[in-house]
Image (cartoon, rainbow, N blue to C red):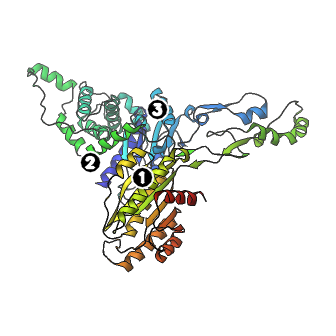
Amino acid sequence: MAEAAWHRAVLALQLLAIDPGLGGMAVRARSGPVRDRFSALLSWLPGAQHRIHPAVSDEALFGGLDLSATLATGAFVQEQGLLSRPGSLVLTMAERATTQLAARLAMTLDAGHAHRLVALDEGAEPDEVLNPKLAERLAFAVDLSQISIGDAVQMPDFDPTVAIIHLRQVTVPDDICDQLTRIAAQFGIDSLRAPLFALRAAKAHAASLGKMTVDADDIEIACVLVLAHRATQMPGSDEEEPEAPEPDQDDREQEQSETLDLPDDLLLEAIKALLPYNLLDRIAAQKARQGKGSGSGAARKGNRRGRPMPSRAGRLGDGARIDIVATLRAAAPWQTIRKQATGRNGLQVRSEDIRVKRFEEKSDRLLVFTVDASGSSALSRLAEAKGAIELLLAQAYARRDHVALVSFRGTAAEVLLPPTRSLVQTKRRLAALPGGGGTPLAAGIVMALEQAIAATRKGLTPTIVILTDGRANVALDGAGNRVQAAADAQRMAQMVRAQGIDALIIDTGNRPEPALSALAQTLGAIYLPMPRADAARLSQSVAAALDD
């Protein structure tokens, strides 16, 4: 199955090399040997390759004034942009592309300048996806995340030159356009780009095999490569089309010469065989994300501009802004020498004089409260945590803090509140929390670590705040063993520290617990023994400890 997915990905790349009208392809794959092997095949695409990143500037894409050359020559020098050069664009970290960049690339593909776009989607989370408006303009989407290096077999060299020339001679039966549109509609695909892409893919496949006319095999392969990943619903099986009147013998012979007899059921089954088993769940999740705002996620993942820093030498590009005062200050000592060398009067600024501005950016902070909900005093600790979180959320808009709540009791831990700054949502989630049972401290640390790592990928700076009395008695495997539970907690604490995540331990026991102090040393965390702490003291202590 994985090897077949690899061959489909390679075939899609070959068709893209033949016909630039297919727009491009989205490749979802983690960094590794499989993606490296597929990236090596991008040399099949005609023309030069230009790698771009999500923060690429408009000047780099469209060109603009070459300030360094203009100042050096005294005449306007226009810099050529990447989009003005023929070739292929390889967009790395495509899931992080901003809406503005997606719009610019979509505009370029719509203009039909023979650019091919390969979007390398490295998203590790389900909500990290390519901008849907840009993905709509790419004929193919392949997923290499489940393919091992053993399944990614070496492919022979491929030269699309002959197929590109032969593509102009390939003809298409008259009824294929109607059939492709009908098939797309049955899978809930409402964009007309999909059947048009499928038609072009079928012609490119026929050209790669030297055929003069598109046949049933070409159509089936095109539908699988273009329509399967776009499906938003399963085709209904209870709807029957009205029967058409039986044509006479002469009409039947004429249709056989002008049309392609390919049943819709054959194409439907071919596409359904490749649909993911959780298609409906994926569509529901996608609609939920789109209901929150941009379908491609936040334009800026938690980062905002901070204090200005000293400027540095550099060149304009990638959104950099020139520091005029610093640039003139750097050029001033050389004016006499430059005037004598060039014989020209006036200010002379060279490229090495350019100074660009810098800013210290600070990411938003996430506080992951990890609350011990076990034992007889669980309710009081949860009430304290609830009050502290509400107090912190009241200040969240000013400090840009997000808060998450993890509870551990019995034999496992659970996320009671995902990262949020919504006070209303917090009160609803914290209205009724269960308590009692054992103390799986290690499981709580693991769950908090998962939340912290996910937040880091989204541009947040997490801090884990553990609220417990320290009497861990449940190991990671769920067994009631105090010795093993303490060892597991120490081992998980080492993992947190290895990730470089800040932590804070608040001891709510009646007296300080030595085991918690040792755990704080392993975490490299602040240890605050606070027996019978109320919500106000807890909030003040957390704020003071985090601001140190």
Provide residue 292's location: percent of width, then percent of height. Answer: 39, 39
Q: Amino acid at mark 3?
A: Ala
331 left or right of 110 in image: right
Q: Is residue 509 visible?
A: yes
Dot 3 corresponds to which residue?
106
Task: Identify which residue, 9 or 300, lies in the foreground.
Answer: 300
Q: Residues within 10 Å of mark 3 (few under 14, many from 20)?
A: some
Q: If you read the primary sequence from the N terminus, does the residue marked by circle 2 or circle 3 appear first?
A: 3
Dot 2 corresponds to which residue?
278
Q: Relative to 515, say whether 139 is above or below.
A: above
Dot 1 corresponds to which residue?
124
Q: Residues within 10 Å of mark 1 (few under 14, many from 20)?
A: some
Q: If you read the primary sequence from the N terminus, does the residue marked by circle 1 or circle 2 appear first?
A: 1
Determine whether label 2 and label 3 are within 8 Å by CB: no
- Give the Cα distance between marks 1 and 3: 24 Å
Task: Identify which residue, 408 or 45, lies in the foreground.
Answer: 408
